Structure formats: structure tokens, C-alpha cells
Image: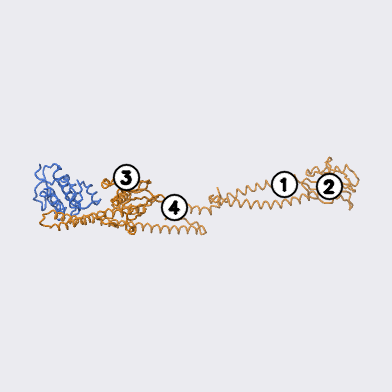
Chain colours: A orange, B blue
């Protein structure tokens, strides 16, 4: 696990332990260096003291040239097991006696060298004059094997160092375990509080302040931010409640309006049409032939207004009704829409062409209405064509929306007047040419827009028209929040 | 053959009464129509009280009931009828301008027998009234009654 992902408690302990080990190693190194030099000095001093004693003891042997005595004296060095070689030279520098008896040749220098002891590799060796009453009787050679001593000494100090280190590490571990809590505990508490809040979304919780240090200030800042979030949240909730209430009221008003339109505006129209009809049917003496014509106009207008009111109510309802979103098979919708127009199409020569249509998410009934309106338009405006060609397909290209089109070879329209095409009761043709109130495309636009899509059209007069609508592939409905309220 | 096939028309608008009667006249059903001008009058008629205290005995074969009326509306009349053990079997047809869903739902929940929206087109209105009148006053067999 990388260090930055390690829990903060372990991180702190690791830092403390690593620091202790490094400090200890540095101290141990310095101490060892000091000890090393002290040890060399001591060895040198010991050897030179030993040399002085042996030199003093061997004066008689040298003075009387007694080699046996000299050997005897040197053999006392057996007690010092690190002395590997010793020799006595006579006044003239010739080898007088040596220790031990057998030695590989070259171990002992043939002639005495300069006075004094020197360290060479793995040994300390040197010469010391044997002096009696101011005159030099000969020279003593001593050779101490230092390699073994050094190894023993180093091994000993390493053992001590390891033992000390183990103890220190144990103490440091125990100490750091309890001390790191001073820093990690408040941080962990803060983290735990933050986690609990983000899980439960309860912004009324506050973190406990550990003290007056940086962590205390961090906790203060944290709590202050929580307070702000809580206030903002409350304001937001309050606003949502207010807006929902406003929306509900507006919806209710709209409903009441539509109800009264449905009831009260239609009744007088029915009366106008009814009594005009009764007059037409009545005795010819009452109303002239011309008057009958006028009465027919009155009745027609009343019927037309009735149709307009019905269309408007349906349009208004389309905007308010709840959407039932699910997977929709567009092929099936197209087939149903074409089927529903059989009455108008059975006397006509129409070539239907349906391309590939992908499955989409949407309100099935509403999308069916879209196809019914677009295909009904195509059927209506191709009336002068023989044969009429109506093509339904999907435009490829965009990755985030599905663009469906309905294309016809009908009378088309002038694109200059296309701006209001999808508006309520907007028409580009006279009612005598092509019947209709102009609500169909407005409904198409409203349904598609409630699905989060777009509507547009392309045409040239006489060259047919293509109507497009798009549906987003990941559907985000526009006013669903307003729709989910059960307002009847 | 029953002696009298009476229709109770509950309607506040004089114009609608005229039109409905004109439509029924075409099928010779108009002279068996009793008109109540609102919900209160309708219940008065059914219970033979108030200005209908001296009415002929017996119940209408069908009640054509408007919804939007002063004093007591059609849905309230329907509710009271359906909670009365004597009146609840009387066939009731809503004959109204409204095709609003809440009205439709409420009517059927209260147990209405039919719901007819008055078409704006007079020709179709006549047709609708004719169908309703002929079906309920001629074809349909009313519930059995000992008295009324």
C-alpha cells in the first residue's frame, strides 16, 4: 500500500519510528567511531607496556648472552594469546631469540627496524630497545594479531547495538502508539463526522472541537460550513415547497379554467347551432332561401368553434397530463397510425415507405399521437398527388438524439412562413383547400418538447415537406417535477 | 306494455330543454317528458314532494341528468339517488356538456348507467338524444316495481 493511502494513525507511527531508528543509527555510528579509536589507543598502550616489561626482564639474558633465559622470558608471552610473534635481537642486530620456536620464515624481520609500534593490516607490530643504564643491549620485536580482537570487539558492539535498538524500538513503538492519538484522534473524529453527514444528509450534526490548535480551527471551519449548508438546504427546501405550491395552484386554476371552458363555452354554441338548425328545418314560409343560407353559415361557424374549443382543451390537457415513460417500438406506432387513417386512405394511391426506426424511451400514447398528427398531415397535403409517397424513417448522425422524419411529396409550403408552423391554430393553407384547425403540429411540438426533444421542418412549395422530431437518447424530461404531483 | 313511459329531464338551461324536447319530438317521445330545473326539483319529483307533491304515481323509466346546475348539481343528485334503496335502481343517464375526466370518473364511480356528451353539432345532438330516448324509453326494460 503506498504511503499516501496508509491510514493516518499508521503514518504517524511510521514517522516516529523511522525518526527514532535514524537518530539511533547516527548516534551509534558516532559512538562506534569514538570507541574504535579509543580501543586502538588502549591496545597500543598495552602492547608498549608489555614490551617495556619484557625488555626490562631480558636485560640480564642479553647482557650475559644467555639464549635459554631469553627464550624462557619470551615464552611467558603464551599468556597473551594475541601475541603471535616476538623476537630479541643482540647489540649488533642479529636474531638472538624468538617466540614461538617454530615460525614461518619472514614472519620476523631479519634485522631490527625503527623504534615504535605501528598498525599494519590486521596486526600491530614494532621494535623497542632493551636498555640498561643508558646503553642499548639489544632490541625487542613484538607482533600482536589485531584482526581477531577487532572482530570480537566489533561483534560485541554490534550485539549491544542490536539489543539497545530493540529496546528503543519497543519503547518508541509503545510511546508513539499512545502519542499519535493526540493528533490522529481528532482528525479521525472529524473524518467520521463528515462521513456520517454525507451518508445520512443530516446537516444538523456538529463535530466536537478537540482544542485550540489548528485542528480546533479546522473543526470550527468545518462546523461553520455545515451551518451554511444547513441554512442553504433549508432555504432550498422552503423554496421548493413554495414553488410546488405555486405550481399546484396554477395547475388547479388551469384545470378549473378548462373545466369551465368545457362546460360553459360549448353550451351557447350548441344552442346557436341547435336553434339555427331548427329554423332551417322549419316551415319555408318563416325563413327565405337566402336566410337559410345565412343560418347554415351560423351553424357552420358554431360547429367550427366547437371543434376549436375541443382542440384547445385537448392541447391544454396534453401539457398537463402525467407522462408514463417506458420502452416504445416506433415501428408499431407507425403501423398503428397508418391503420387509424384507413378511412381517408383507402380511396387513395399512397406508397408507404418505412425505414429503420430505433427503439426509444417515452410515453407510448403521446408518441403515437405525434405519428398520427404527422402522418395525417402527410396524407392530407398529398391529396393532389397520384401516387402519394410518404416516407417515415430515422436520420443517422447524432449520437445523443434520435431524429425521426415523416416525408411526403405533397404541396409543401414556403419556408418563409415556417416560423409559426408549430404554433397553436397556425395554418399555411386556407380551410377551403385543406381542412383543419392548426392544432396538430402544436401538439407534436408540445409532446416532443415534454420528451426533451426538438421539432423542425423543411419544404419547398410544390416539392413536398419533411417534418422532423428528435428524442434524446438519454431521456431527461423537461418538466417532470411539475407533472408528478397528483393534481387530478 | 306499461301504461306510461315517462322520462325525467333534469336541466337548468331553457334553451337546452327546448333543444332536447325538439329532438325528442321527432321521435314522438316529448309528451312523456317531465322537466326538473335543478337537482332540488329532481329530488322533489322523485320523492313526490314540494311542487311535485301531487304528481302521478310511478317512476320515470330513465332520468336524463345534467351535471352543472344551480343549487344541487347532477353528481349530488346521483349520489343521493344511489344511496336510497328505492331510487338506486332507476336508470340514470348523464347528458352534459362536459367531457372532463373528473366528471366522467365521478359519475361512473357513483354508478351512472350511461354518460352522453351533448355534441355541438345539432344534427348529432338530435341523434344522441334520439338514441338515448329510444333505448331507455322503448327498448330497455325498467327495474320491477310494486308501487311508486
Task: Give x and y (percent) for residue A421.
Answer: 32, 57
Labels 4, 2: one chain: yes
Q: Can residue B142 be seen in this view?
A: no
Front residue of this view, candidates A51 and B76: B76
Going from N to C along the chain, the mark reached first, 3 or 4, is 4
> Which mark is drawn over residue A335?
3
Distance, label 3 to label 4, CA atoms, is 51 Å
Which mark is first along the chain, 1 or 2?
2
Image quadrant where residue A300 sits: bottom left
Front disc: 1 or 3: 3
Contact (Cβ within 8 Å) of mark 4 with mark 1? no
The crowd level at tag 4 (other Cα within 10 Å; few <14, some 14-19, many 20+) is few
Tell me, yes or no, whether the two marked residues, 2 and 1, touch with CB atoms within 8 Å: no
Q: State the residue position of label 1.
A: A153
Q: Do the residues labelled 3 and 4 touch (CB within 8 Å)?
A: no
Q: Classify mark 2: helix, strand or loop.
A: strand
Circles 2 and 1 on the same chain:
yes
Element type at mark 1? helix
Give the percent coordinates (x, y) of residue A325: 35, 48
| Gap in angstroms between the C-alphas marked 2 and 1 | 25 Å
Chain hosting mark 3:
A
Residue B58 in the image, given as x and y percentages of width and height: 11, 46
- Looking at the image, residue A149 sits to the left or right of residue A233; the answer is right
Q: Is mark 3 on a helix, strand or loop?
A: helix
Binning the other alpha carbons within 10 Å of mark 2 as few (below 14), some (14 to 19) or many (20 upward) gives many
Amino acid at each position: 500500500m503506498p504511503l499516501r493511502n496508509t491510514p493516518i494513525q499508521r503514518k504517524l507511527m511510521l514517522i516516529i519510528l523511522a525518526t527514532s531508528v535514524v537518530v539511533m543509527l547516527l548516534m551509534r555510528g558516532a559512538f562506534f567511531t569514538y570507541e574504535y579509536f579509543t580501543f586502538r589507543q588502549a591496545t597500543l598502550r598495552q602492547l608498549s607496556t608489555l614490551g617495556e616489561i619484557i625488555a626490562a626482564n631480558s636485560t640480564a639474558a642479553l647482557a650475559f648472552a644467555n639464549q635459554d633465559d631469553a627464550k624462557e622470558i619470551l615464552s611467558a608471552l603464551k599468556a597473551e594469546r594475541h601475541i603471535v610473534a616476538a623476537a630479541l635481537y643482540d647489540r649488533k642486530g642479529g636474531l638472538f631469540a624468538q617466540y614461538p620456536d617454530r615460525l614461518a620464515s619472514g614472519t620476523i624481520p631479519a634485522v631490527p627496524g625503527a623504534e615504535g609500534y605501528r598498525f599494519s593490516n590486521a596486526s600491530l607490530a614494532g621494535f623497542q630497545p632493551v636498555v640498561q643504564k643508558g646503553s642499548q643491549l639489544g632490541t625487542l620485536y613484538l607482533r600482536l594479531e589485531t584482526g581477531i580482537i577487532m572482530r570480537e570487539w566489533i561483534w560485541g558492539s554490534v550485539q549491544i547495538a542490536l539489543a539497545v535498538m530493540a529496546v528503543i524500538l519497543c519503547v518508541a513503538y509503545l510511546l508513539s502508539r499512545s502519542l499519535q492519538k493526540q493528533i490522529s484522534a481528532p482528525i479521525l473524529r472529524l473524518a467520521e463526522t463528515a462521513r456520517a453527514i454525507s451518508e445520512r444528509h443530516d446537516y444538523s450534526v456538529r463535530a466536537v472541537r478537540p482544542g485550540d490548535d489548528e485542528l480546533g480551527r479546522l473543526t470550527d471551519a468545518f462546523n461553520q460550513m455545515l451551518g451554511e449548508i444547513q441554512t442553504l438546504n433549508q432555504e432550498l427546501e422552503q423554496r421548493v415547497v413554495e414553488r410546488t405550491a405555486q405550481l399546484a395552484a396554477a395547475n388547479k386554476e388551469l384545470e378549473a379554467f378548462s373545466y369551465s371552458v368545457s362546460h360553459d363555452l360549448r353550451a351557447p354554441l350548441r344552442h346557436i347551432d341547435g336553434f339555427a338548425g331548427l329554423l332551417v328545418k322549419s316551415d319555408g314560409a318563416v325563413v327565405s332561401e337566402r336566410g337559410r343560407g345565412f343560418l347554415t353559415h351560423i351553424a357552420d361557424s358554431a360547429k367550427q368553434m366547437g371543434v376549436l374549443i375541443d382542440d384547445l382543451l385537448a392541447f391544454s390537457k396534453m401539457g398537463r397530463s402525467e407522462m408514463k415513460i417506458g420502452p416504445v417500438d416506433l415501428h408499431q406506432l407507425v403501423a398503428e397510425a397508418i391503420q387509424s387513417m384507413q378511412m381517408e386512405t383507402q380511396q387513395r394511391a399512397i406508397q408507404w415507405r418505412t425505414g429503420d426506426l430505433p427503439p426509444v424511451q417515452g410515453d407510448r400514447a403521446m408518441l403515437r399521437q405525434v405519428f398520427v398528427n404527422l402522418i395525417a398531415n402527410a396524407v392530407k397535403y398529398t391529396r393532389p398527388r397520384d401516387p402519394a409517397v410518404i416516407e417515415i424513417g430515422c436520420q443517422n448522425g447524432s449520437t445523443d438524439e434520435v431524429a425521426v422524419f415523416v416525408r411526403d411529396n405533397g404541396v409543401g409550403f414556403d419556408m418563409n412562413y415556417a416560423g409559426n408552423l408549430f404554433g397553436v391554430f397556425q395554418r399555411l393553407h386556407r380551410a377551403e383547400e385543406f381542412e383543419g384547425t392548426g392544432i396538430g403540429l402544436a401538439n407534436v411540438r408540445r409532446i416532443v418538447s415534454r420528451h426533451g426533444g426538438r421539432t423542425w421542418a423543411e419544404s419547398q412549395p410544390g416539392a413536398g415537406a419533411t417534418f422532423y422530431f428528435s428524442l434524446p437518447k438519454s431521456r431527461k424530461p423537461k418538466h417532470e417535477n411539475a407533472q408528478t404531483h397528483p393534481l387530478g | 306494455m306499461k301504461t306510461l313511459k315517462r322520462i325525467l329531464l333534469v336541466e337548468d338551461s331553457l334553451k337546452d330543454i327546448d333543444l332536447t324536447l325538439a329532438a325528442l319530438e321527432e321521435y314522438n317521445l316529448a309528451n312523456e317528458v317531465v322537466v326538473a330545473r335543478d337537482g332540488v326539483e329532481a329530488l322533489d319529483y322523485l320523492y313526490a314532494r314540494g311542487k311535485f307533491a301531487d304528481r302521478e304515481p310511478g317512476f320515470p323509466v330513465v332520468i336524463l341528468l345534467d351535471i352543472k346546475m344551480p343549487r344541487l348539481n347532477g353528481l349530488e343528485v346521483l349520489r343521493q339517488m344511489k344511496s336510497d334503496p328505492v331510487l338506486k335502481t332507476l336508470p340514470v343517464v348523464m347528458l352534459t356538456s362536459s367531457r372532463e375526466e373528473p366528471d366522467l370518473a365521478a359519475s361512473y364511480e357513483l354508478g351512472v348507467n350511461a354518460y352522453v356528451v351533448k355534441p355541438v353539432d345539432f344534427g348529432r345532438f338530435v341523434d344522441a338524444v334520439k338514441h338515448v330516448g329510444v333505448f331507455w324509453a322503448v327498448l330497455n326494460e325498467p327495474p320491477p316495481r310494486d308501487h311508486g
